[in-house]
Amino acid sequence: MKNIVRLFAILILTQSSFAFQNKQKLPNIVLINADDLGYGDLSCYGATKLQTPNIDKLAKEGRMFTDAHSASAVCTPSRYALLTGEYPIRYGNLNRPIFLKDKLVIDTQKETIASVLKKAGYATACVGKWHLGFGTKKPVDWNKPLTPGPNELGFDYYYGVPVVNSHPPFVYVENHNVVGLTEDDPFIYGQKAKTKEVFEKMNLDHIGGADKAHALYVDEQVGTHLKEKAIGWMKAQKEKPFFLYFATTNIHHPFTPAPQFKGTSESGLYGDFVHELDWIVGEVMKTLKEMGEADNTLVIFTSDNGGMFNATGQKAWKDGHKLNGDLLGFKFDAWEGGHRIPFIAHWPNKIKPGEVSDQLICNVDMLATFAALTEQKLEQGQGQDSKNILGAITGKTNKQIRDEVLLAPKRNSHLAIRKGNWLYIGAQGGGGFGSRKQGHHAFGGPAAISFAGEVNSDIKDGKIKADAQPAQLYNLKTDLYQTKNLYSLYPEKVIEMKALLKSYQSKK
């Protein structure tokens, strides 16, 4: 009997020792994916009308990338690429945001960044904006368990905003269920809940009822609430290395910072919302330090696409804040402003402080990178568009790891391909929003370019010129701001890039 007890004790100690060694060997990973944060929205990337000291500190102590891109200039397809390692064109030309009626857009047989890390022994969580759908049927029944969803894609835990903070149902979801939902107060499509309208003039597809669940969702508390959930989950992790995918609702419209951040910037509510985001990042880093995990955690901070030129963005522009710096275009566009994003990697003792990289990387690369970090090999057909950029993140190599990247705007007609320094866009214009009305939510295209004082050889007085070329070619090494379309000057390069683009379109 004593021998059995001794053997049992040895077994427990061995398992505990293995868990301890595993936690020490593998770094924790925190991936913060901000929403609609533009290339020029951080002071470390050149912003002057707002300040982001906590994110700047990440850059100062880590590695900042200047040629990082989201695979799509649109929120849902960008997140699809981030999680699956596949371009959104692989999923039926996925090019639009999905809404409350839409089913899950990721096949549960797909590997995701969460499932790969879970196989490596990580505790995994997604906190924040999901925006990838739930279930297998349309429309989604919000009164029933929302499955499949994040939990079926490798996340042990999910808590957050199921769609987007500007669209119904305006509730929180925890794992498979709406928080606060009761049987006597169900959701009913076509009815309005007794809650504050976010956009009174927008034709939103309402789902009414469930006022108890709606009451828990307060616009100005969303950012701080999600922060509490994120750091609370981190603090609860004891035995395993952990992976937190923290998808903030900042800085997607509506711009609803908590009261303590209002009036703190020189660019209105837009800048104030960025200030709240910076504080959130600071709280995450503070928590890691308090936990004693700061030195053993890889923190990646990035955005899902470029900054959006909605009414609040236009006001910030008038105040002197350039959402995407001097890049051409905005969210939804194939132009650089639509998809070139901030990307900062922080990992003490593994990444040299203060480094700036011009290596071409994409958010679709996270799957292969996390697999490599945990010494796993992806099965054939999984993460087919993802490249292992671990060497770029750590600075072990300054060579280009990827030579090309497919870039998807809102309109599939404007699908773009980047190869080396060349960018080819298969149509005229940006391929994003196109309203010509200043102050309008969908203000974009040539009219917005002229309003913003940006220059492009195909655009004059807010319109595409009558003699403009049918498509676009830019050399980003000599013309980062895309002032001159070189389509007619390099016909052989056009043929090459067009053929490369078609090769992706035929592999869907």
Image (cartoon, rainbow, N blue to C red):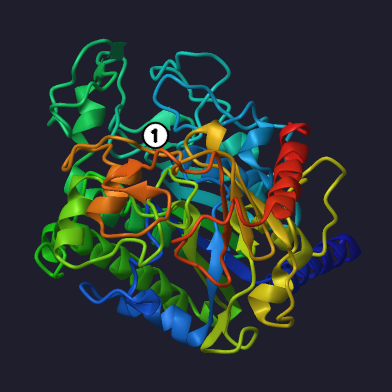
Q: Which x, y percent locates residue 132?
A: 51, 34
In the picture as drawn, the residue positioned furthest to the front comes out as 467
Residue 196: where, in percent of width, then height?
12, 31
Task: Determine the residue positioned at 87% across, 43% down.
Answer: 380
Query: With 30 as the anchor, is 432 left or right in this view?
Result: left
Count all numbered tags in the image, as a single digit. 1
Eyeballing the image, is 258 above or below 358?
Answer: above
Label 1 belongs to which residue? 163
Instruction: Assign the N terminus to one quadrant of the image.
Output: bottom right
Image quarter (top left, top right, bottom left or bottom right) of the C terminus:
top right
Query: Based on the displayed image, in which of its 4 quarters is residue 404 positioned?
Result: bottom right
The answer to whether any part of residue 302 appears in the image is no
Nearer to me, 300 or 236: 300
Viewer can see residue 310: yes
Residue 439 at what x, y percent from top left?
Answer: 16, 42
Q: In the visual, does 495 lie left or right of 430?
A: right
Q: Is residue 194 left or right of residue 159?
A: left
Q: Residue at x 30, y 27 (%)?
A: 169
Amino acid type, label 1:
Val
Q: Extreme right residue here?
A: 3
Q: Nearer the viewer, residue 125 or 393?
A: 393
In the depicted view, which residue is nearer to us: 339 or 147? 339
User: Relative to 477, is 252 on the left or the right?
Assistant: left
In the image, what residue occupies the spot 21% across and 60% down? 317
SS type, badge 1 = loop
Instruction: Give the percent coordinates (x, y) of residue 217.
Output: 23, 38
Q: Which residue shows up at 55% across the image and 27% down it?
A: 104
Q: Nearer the viewer, residue 396 or 3?
A: 396
- Circle 1 packing at 10 Å, graded few (<14), some (14-19), many (20+), is many
The picture quadrant where one finds residue 67 is: bottom right
